[in-house]
Amino acid sequence: MTLLTKTSRMFPDFPSSLMDFFNEGRDWGNGWTNKLPAANITEGDKAFNLELAAPGLEKEDFDLSIDNQLLTVSCQKEEQSESKDKQYTRKEFSYRSFSRSFVLPESVDAEKINASYRDGVLNIELPKKETALKQPRKQISVG
């Protein structure tokens, strides 16, 4: 009977136990890496809509800014928990942060952008300028 072992594509001679720790593509979690929230962008007749999945946050945790047609959405949150039991005390700190930037098209009216946060989703409405809105069909008569 042969025991199967997992090897690394980058370092095939490395022992499997070490590669389990330094695994390519490993999700470190717990603040070891900054994970970017997933984004959905849709376009309607009057506005673009940007949705970011960011559960577990509060609306006060977000910072949105626009600089030269670049929309930046960032967040930084610090969490602390303390547990006292018998003869020891344990404190755990957790930091979550991310920053995502989106280049806005010229058709977006930056003065009218608004955002809301509900059920773990940050929703940013990016209204189009009046000149970018689809104009109704106009019939032209020949004289």
Image: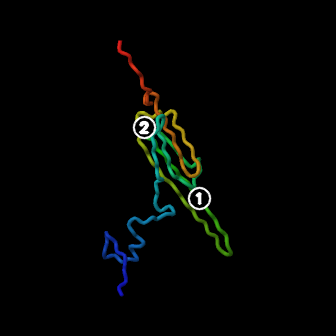
Locate residue 16, reporting x and y percent.
Answer: 38, 77
Which amino acid type is shown beneath numbered disc 2? Gln
Identify residue for label 2.
69
36 is higher (above) or lower (below) than 65: below
Please name the residue shown 57% across and 47% down the image. 117
Question: Circle 2 sits in a helix, a strand or a loop, which is it?
Answer: loop
Q: Quadrant of residue 133?
A: top left
| Quadrant in the rendering for residue 105 | top left
Q: Position of residue 124 (x, y in %)?
A: 51, 42
Q: How far apart, in angstroms, are the residues tagged by discs 2 and 1?
A: 33 Å
Q: Position of residue 18 (x, y in %)?
A: 39, 75
Mark 1 neighbour class, 10 Å CA radius: few under 14, some 14 to 19, many 20 or more: few
- Residue 66 numbered tag: none
- Amino acid, disc 1: Glu
Instruction: Choose the circle earlier in sequence order: 2 or 1.
Output: 2
Q: Quadrant of the C terminus?
A: top left
In the image, is 46 to the left or to the right of 6?
A: right
User: Outermost residue toward the top?
Assistant: 143
Residue that appears at 48% across and 36% down: 47
Q: Residue at x 46, y 57 (%)?
A: 35
For residue 79, which numbered disc appears in the image? 1
